[in-house]
Amino acid sequence: MKTLKINTNPEVRAVYKKYPKEARLKIENLRRIIFETANEIEELTELEETLKWGEPSYLAKKGSTVRIDWKPKAPNQYAIYFSCSTTLIETFKQVYGNLFDYEGKRAIVFQMDDNIPEKELKSCIRAALTYHRVKKLDKLGL
């Protein structure tokens, strides 16, 4: 079994600590799902955890950035963000239809009381973390 090296910017922890408890638990769960997914991608050996626009962000070689955040202006929801210049969200909509709630071409949004369809979300994250390898595949290989 491979070992995934995670390079974490220490400032990320400070952002997690600023979230209200309920939001922090939800965002930390998304973080767990991202780490699990990255670890399941055989060719992925390194993942960078950093901040982009003040939000926890995850980058992999040959991938597209994945960000997660909760915002005080929408306290009952949190989201996982994908680059809007990719075909990721458009493809997720084709493959998963209304399984997820989307925000334009950039995010999958969850309500605080939602049950996350983990298997499907992991496939979305996998597509993002390997985007430059899968972008020419039909439906990104989903």
Image: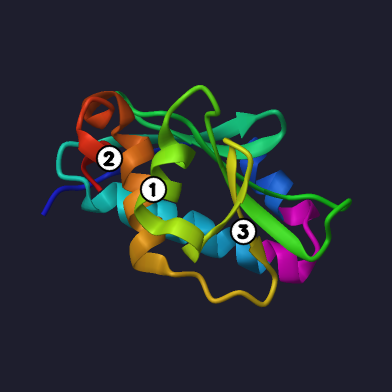
Q: Position of residue 34 (x, y in %)?
A: 42, 52
The residue at which mark 2 appears reads as 139
Q: Position of residue 108 (x, y in %)?
A: 57, 51
Name the residue nearer the viewer: 64 or 20.
Answer: 64
Badge number at residue 94? 1
Q: Residue furthest right?
A: 73
Asked whether the beta carbons under mark 1 and mark 2 sit within 8 Å of each other, the answer is yes
Instruction: Classify the position of the N terminus by image quarter.
Output: bottom left
- Of the two numbered discs 1 and 2 on the same chain, state the one appearing first in sequence: 1
Q: Position of residue 109 (x, y in %)?
A: 63, 55
Q: Residues within 10 Å of mark 2 (few under 14, many from 20)?
A: some
Which amino acid type is marked by label 2?
Answer: Lys
Residue shown at 69%/52% (left/top)? 16
Range of residues picked out in magenta? 17-24
Specify the principal SS of the magenta part: helix
Q: Secondary structure at mark 3?
A: helix
Name the residue nearer the viewer: 31 or 88.
Answer: 88
With respect to residue 9, does 120 lie above or below?
A: below
